[in-house]
Image: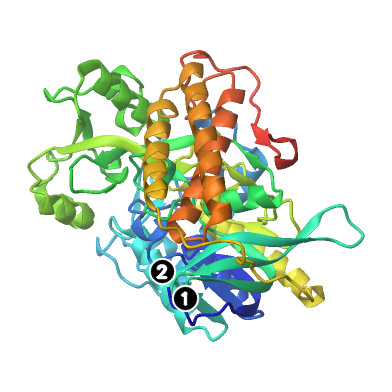
Amino acid sequence: MNPSAVQQNFVFDILIIGSGAAGLTLALKTADFAKVAVLSKGDLNQGATFYAQGGIAAVLDETDSVESHVADTLSAGVGLCHEDMVEHIVTESADAVKWLVSQGVPFTTKDLGDTRKTDSVNADLSSLHLTQEGGHSHRRIIHATDATGKAVFETLQQRAQAHPNIELLAGCTAVDLVTQEQEGSSGSVCVGVYVLNQESACVDLIKSKFVALATGGASKAYLYTTNPDGASGDGIAMAWRAGCRVANMEFNQFHPTCLFHPHAKSFLITEALRGEGATLELPDGSRFMPNFDSREELAPRDIVARAIDHEMKRLGCDCVYLNISRKPADFIREHFPTIYSRCLEFGIDITSERIPVVPAAHYTCGGIMVNKVGETDISNLYAIGETSFTGLHGANRMASNSLLECFVVAFGAAADIHSKIAVTSHSPHIEAWDESRVTISDDEVLVSHNWDELRRCMWDFVGIVRNNERLQRAERRIKILREEVQDYYIKHRVTKDMLELRNLVLVSELIIACALQRKESRGLHFTLDYPDTNNEAMDTILHPRSAD
C-alpha cells in the first residue's frame, strides 16, 4: 500500500461499471452528450466479451425471419422467455449488426472467408458469412472467424479510447453503490459508487448522475468455468445490497464443450464447431447425442451438457471428445484458427485428432430485474448484459443471443438516459468512504480458503444435476461462509480478492434460494426430486426486503 495515498472524489455524468460489449456500447452511444467513465477491475480486456468465440445471432438471410428466430429462442427457453422482450431484441438485431459494421468490426465475409473491414457507410449485410449453432433452425450467426468477441471488443475499445468524452479507468473495483432516498417518492436513487483503486489501495468516491452495471455474470462461483477471473457476480451482488430484485438465478448455463487439459485453464471450444459438423464421441469413438435428442449435436446447450454429464458419470470417464477431423484440414484452419492454434499448443492437432472436452459453468441466465431499456428498481441505475435479467433467455440461453442482448439493451439505455440527463443533477453531498475502524489484514489465507471451498461446494451440490439434499447442504455451508466473510469485511480494509469473494458468496446464496423454490425441472435447472416440467412457467423472483 502507498502510505501517502489519499481518497479522491470524481464526478461524471455516466459511470459504467464493466468494460465489455455492453459497457463499451453504452459509453459510445452516450459520449456525444455526456461525460462518461468506464470502470474495469483489471486490464480492459479481461471481460467475457474478449473471449467470446461464437458470434452474434441476427436475422440477415432472406431465407430466415424474425418469427423463426423468435420461435427458436422461445423453444430453447423452455416456456420461460418473455415473448415481448424476445420479439423486441430479435427485431432490432439487424440494426445492431449495422451499427457494429459502422464502427468497423471486421466480420467474416462470404467471399473472403476471412475477416475484413466492411464499408462503414454502405455496408452490405448480405455479404457477411453466417454459421449455425445449437438451437438455431437457420444460419444466422455473424462472426469474425472464431474470435468474434475479441474483434468486437478491440474495435469498440479503440473507438472509446479515441473519444474525448470517455475515460477508461483500469484497476478499479466497485465496492458498493451509493443510493439516497428520493424526495417525494418511496424509492431510492443511485448517486454514485465507492470504488477501490487497486494502485493506491484507497476507496474513492465517484459521483455520477447515472450508473450502469455491465459487470457480466457469476460463473466464477463454480470450480470449472469458461469465464475469465473477473466474473464474480459483482453487479448482481451490489444491486441486491442496494435493494434491487433479482430473478431466475437458478438457471446457470454450463457450456457443453470446454477443453479438458490440465494447463488449458477454461478454454472454450465454440459451438460453431458442432454447427459445422463436429460430433461428440465417447472414448471408444461411438456417438451418443442421437440417443438424447433428435437434433443430436445441435440440441440446445442444456440438453447437450446433461448428456455429456450423464455419459461421464455412467462410464466414469474424465471427458468426452469432439471430433471435426472429418472436415478438410484447410477448412478447419480457415474457419477455426484460434481453436486450431490453441489446441496445437497442448499437442492436439484438431485436423486429425479429437478434442477432449467437459462441461463448464458459462453463463448466468438470471440477474438484476430490468425493463426493455435496462432500468432497475432504483432510479438512475441501469443493468445491461449478462448481469441483468431481461426475460430474453428464459430457462436456457440460446447460443449467440447474449451479445445481441448487450447491444440492443445498451441502445435503449442510452436513449433513456438522453431523455433524462438535462433535468438530472448530481447529489449535493455524499459521505466519503470511512475506514477509520478497520485494520490491514495479516491473514489472507481465510479469503483464499473460503474462495476455494465456495467454488467446490457449488460445483458438487449446485451443478448440472441437482436434488434437495445437495441444495440444502450447500445452503448450510454457504451461510457459514457468508458469516465468516462478513465478519472479515467489517474488520479489515477491503481488497479486490475479498470484495469478489463477498459478492460470490452472496450470489451463490441467491442461486441456491432460487433453485430451492423451483419445484420442477426446466431447462438448465434439472433436479432429481422434481424431474417433470410444470404446466405453468413462472419466474423465480427474489426481493431483498423479504429476504432473511
Disc 2 marks a residue whose amino acid type is Leu
Between residues 339 and 85, which one lies in front from this camera angle?
A: 339
Residue 347 in picture, x, y percent from top left: 7, 48
Disc 1 marks a residue whose amino acid type is Ser
Q: Which of the 4 image quadrants contains residue 74?
A: top right
Say which residue appears at 49% left-offset and 82% top-offset: 4
Using a 10 Å C-alpha cutoff, classify the residue at mark 2 as few (fewer than 14 neighbours), some (14 to 19) or many (20 or more): many
Please give the label number shown on residue 126.
Answer: none
Tell which circle, 1 or 2, labels the residue nearer the N-terminal end: 2
Residue 507 in picture, x, y percent from top left: 54, 42
Residue 531 in picture, x, y percent from top left: 49, 14
Left or right of 348 on screen, residue 313: right
Q: Does 446 appear above or below 315? A: below
Between residues 409 and 480, which one lies in front from this camera angle?
A: 480
Residue indicated by mark 2:
44
Residue indicated by mark 1:
200
